[in-house]
């Protein structure tokens, strides 16, 4: 098929009647021009130059439909190349073994071939979107894997680039979210010079009373990344520091400034919506502290200078702890992930491996019990950061399980061991909540999550039996979570602190996210056979559960809500998974409509609905409201609003999705509607419901979201994802 397509693409038509190409093949009587040129092409003066045929955008639908039919015919005229199947004992039926009369109608042929392949138990074939999405916008080269939420949206428009070439280019405007003068993140990667000395850094410290309050807030209120800094050890070193500040290692000073910066950022988060008690930190008097953002920048810059002065790339004591805390600083208020953050994680991973953190301390007798356990805690944190950032950006993980044997940290409080402990105590039972218990629970999910991530990023498809086995492992990992961290509903969480409730919700969202990534492929048109209904239902149910939790979190983080005091943790912890769930349901609504129009759903019982479409529509409308409120500060939220605005408006045009609860574009903020600069309304200039793009691999046609989105590929598949850092660390 590919050879035939290449030959077709090289043919040049001279637009004669009949054309020279048909005449040379003896096909002059069958030479017919498609009705896509309004002018009389028989006139040489009006004929389009060879190779420069201009196709009106209004006829693009017909052109792509014809292209789809041609490809389908070629698909079944060419014998597919054999490929190995994990179930190799089953016979492979080739086209030559079937009657040629079976290939009369392309659509019937597609359905029949799909059923025959399912009956022979072959693996699910790959489509281009399964290999991820690759784009080259003005800002650079970007790639995301098929498990990324943006790739899910992109899979609806496999021929978007072709459409983009047909449309007249529109100038790009400035991104209203990102200030033009903003400095790229992380700042550490762009700090080329050491313009401070140890003495000048120490001189910039505020009075001890202020530092005491900031340190106390970090250990007693914020509780970010518990365990990487042992509270008892740090406080002892803290006392020694004030006795002789100039004798302290510069990288330990970096930890101190990082803690001060995080505490100030925490105060900022509260001060924006509700006053924060000044007794817990800086006084609000401008004469004493000045602008809080200036303090954050000062503390962050000092932490960076400490890393540079300490030659952090060489490793050593306090390096990884300072880097991890600095990582959290850069992510605290970050709404849209920067690719540089992933590079920073890569640096942290490389330095940790250089220092041997990927090998358990038990292999080295020279490492005492206390530093050995602290190494396990730090490595566990690095593994989580790697998994979190890599998956949210749709990129492969940097740490492979086969490369490390570091044991999990024990379920211990800081008070259970210190530098003088000769032998580590046994791990506490999981019924006893410690700061480390949540880390252990996440590692349990990451163990199976790593396998799911590998399946989603590997170019070769896995057998369906392996998919079901992984699904079972996800369920088992969820069942083995500590009872104190299992989400069983809001009613059973009324007697726990808001932080524990957030942790429960986050773990539940993570479980459902893994199910989406594992089963998303089976929402594709090539997987409509009833054999895969289990995967389709699992994926859709997981997406709906995530959006239910999005609604719950949004409600309870409002004033007087159960999560109001922990709302700062939510702002940057859930966005990526909420986006993934939103995009999956948008994808399903589109394919569900197209499935009914084309009757491809005949591969399974058309009377059986996998999910309640009314429920999906209601969840998407609620999600649209939530994303709209966040769109002023997040590009990714604006993308979600753009997709939902089109999906919900388009669904009103279909009788099967019509309800009285119409969502008008006016319900969406103007900043969201004009997400693509230069367009006051990205549904006004295009006939979106009737514009289709062909997916030649799957033999389907897919409605696109909006033609305007073609002009800015980076807005859909840019190197930025949405912030997913788990601030409940």
Image (tube, rainbow, N blue to C red):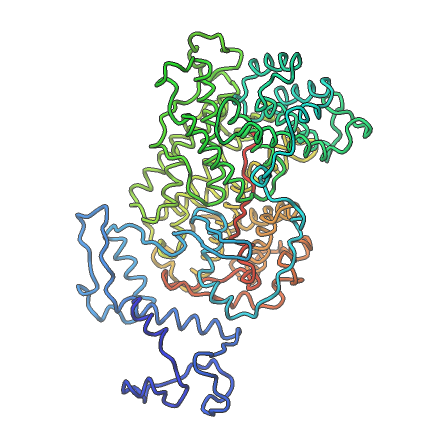
Could you tell whether 22 is left or right of 493 in the image?
left
Q: Is residue 31 above or below residue 103?
A: below
Q: Residue 186's x, y, as percent?
A: 58, 39
**Does residue 668 show up?**
no
Q: Where residue 293 sits: x, y (%)? A: 71, 35
Q: How many numbered circles does the render carry?
A: 0
Q: Is residue 427 above or below residue 599?
A: above
Residue at left offset 38%, top offset 69%: 68
- In the rendered image, the vertical position of residue 515 relative to residue 241, given as above or below: below
In the drawing, does residue 237 fall left or right of residue 680?
left
Does 328 appear above or below 375? below
Point out the image quarter for the C terminus.
top right
Give the position of the N terminus as an image quadrant.
Answer: bottom left
Q: x%, y% of residue 77?
A: 26, 69
Residue 508, visible in the rendered structure: yes
Q: Is residue 471 left or right of residue 726?
A: left
The image shows residue 370 at horizontal and vertical percentages of 46, 14
Question: In percent of the image, x 51 and y 41: which residue is there?
Answer: 577
Q: Quadrant of residue 539?
A: top left
Q: 11 or 710, which is in the foreground?
A: 11
């Amino acid at each position: 098929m590919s050879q035939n397509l290449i030959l077709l693409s090289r043919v040049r038509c001279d637009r004669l009647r009949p054309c020279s190409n048909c005449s040379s093949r003896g096909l002059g009587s069958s030479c017919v021009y498609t009705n896509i040129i309004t002018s009389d092409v028989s006139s040489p003066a009006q004929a389009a130059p060879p190779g420069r045929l201009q196709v009106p955008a209004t006829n693009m639908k017909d052109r792509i439909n014809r292209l789809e039919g041609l490809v389908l015919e070629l698909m079944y005229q060419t014998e597919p190349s054999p490929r190995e199947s994990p179930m190799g004992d089953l016979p492979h039926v080739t086209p030559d073994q079937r009657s040629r009369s079976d290939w009369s109608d392309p659509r019937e042929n597609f359905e029949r071939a799909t059923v025959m392949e399912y009956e022979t138990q072959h693996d699910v074939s790959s489509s281009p979107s399964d290999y991820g999405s690759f784009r080259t916008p003005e800002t650079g080269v970007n790639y995301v894997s098929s498990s990324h939420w943006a790739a899910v949206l992109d899979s609806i428009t496999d021929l978007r680039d072709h459409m983009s070439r047909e449309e007249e280019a529109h100038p790009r405007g400035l991104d209203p979210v990102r200030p033009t003068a903003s400095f790229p993140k992380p700042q550490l990667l762009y700090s080329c010079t050491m313009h401070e000395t140890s003495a000048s850094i120490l001189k910039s410290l505020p009075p001890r009373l202020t530092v005491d309050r900031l340190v106390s807030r970090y250990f007693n209120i914020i509780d970010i990344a518990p365990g990487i800094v042992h509270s008892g050890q740090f406080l002892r070193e803290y006392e020694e520091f004030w006795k002789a500040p100039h004798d302290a290692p510069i990288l330990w000073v970096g930890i101190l400034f990082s803690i001060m910066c995080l505490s100030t950022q925490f105060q900022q988060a509260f001060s924006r919506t509700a006053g924060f008690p000044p007794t817990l930190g800086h006084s609000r008097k401008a004469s004493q502290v000045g602008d809080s953002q200036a303090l954050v920048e000062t503390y962050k810059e000092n932490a960076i200078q400490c890393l540079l002065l300490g030659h952090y790339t060489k490793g050593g004591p306090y390096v990884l702890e300072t880097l991890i805390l600095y990582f959290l600083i850069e992510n605290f208020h970050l709404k849209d992930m920067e690719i540089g953050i992933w590079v920073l994680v890569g640096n942290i991973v490389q330095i940790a491996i250089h220092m041997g953190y990927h090998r358990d301390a038990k292999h080295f007798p020279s490492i005492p019990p206390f530093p050995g356990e602290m190494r396990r805690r730090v490595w566990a944190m690095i593994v989580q950061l790697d998994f979190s950032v890599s998956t949210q950006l749709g990129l492969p993980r940097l740490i492979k399980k086969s490369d490390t044997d570091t044991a999990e940290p024990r379920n211990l409080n800081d008070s259970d061991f210190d530098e003088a402990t000769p032998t580590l105590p046994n791990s506490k039972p999981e019924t006893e909540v410690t700061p480390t218990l949540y880390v252990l629970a996440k590692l349990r999910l990451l163990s199976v999550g790593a396998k799911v991530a590998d399946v989603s990023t590997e170019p070769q498809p896995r057998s369906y039996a392996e998919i079901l086995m992984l699904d079972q492992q996800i369920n088992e990992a969820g069942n083995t979570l500590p009872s104190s961290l299992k989400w069983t509903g809001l009613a059973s969480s009324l007697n726990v602190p808001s932080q524990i409730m957030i942790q429960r919700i986050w773990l539940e969202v993570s479980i459902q996210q893994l199910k989406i990534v594992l089963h998303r492929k089976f929402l594709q048109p090539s997987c409509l056979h009833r054999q895969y209904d289990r995967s389709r239902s699992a994926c859709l149910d997981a997406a709906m559960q995530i959006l239910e939790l999005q609604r719950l979190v949004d409600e309870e983080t409002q004033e007087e809500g159960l999560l109001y005091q922990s709302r700062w943790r939510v702002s940057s912890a859930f966005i990526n998974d909420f986006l993934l769930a939103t995009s999956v349901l948008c994808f399903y609504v589109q394919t569900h409509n197209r499935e009914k129009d084309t009757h491809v759903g005949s591969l399974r019982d058309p009377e059986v609905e996998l999910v309640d479409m009314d429920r999906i529509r209601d969840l998407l409308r609620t999600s649209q409201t939530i994303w709209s409120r966040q769109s002023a500060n997040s590009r990714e939220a604006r993308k979600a609003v753009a997709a939902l605005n089109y999906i919900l408006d388009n669904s009103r045009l279909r009788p099967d999705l019509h309800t009285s609860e119409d969502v008008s574009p006016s319900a969406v903020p103007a900043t969201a509607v004009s997400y693509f600069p230069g367009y006051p309304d990205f549904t006004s200039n295009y006939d979106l419901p009737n514009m289709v793009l062909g997916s030649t691999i799957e033999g389907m046609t897919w409605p696109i979201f909006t033609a305007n989105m073609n002009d800015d590929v980076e807005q859909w598949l840019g190197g930025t994802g949405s912030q997913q850092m788990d601030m409940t660390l």
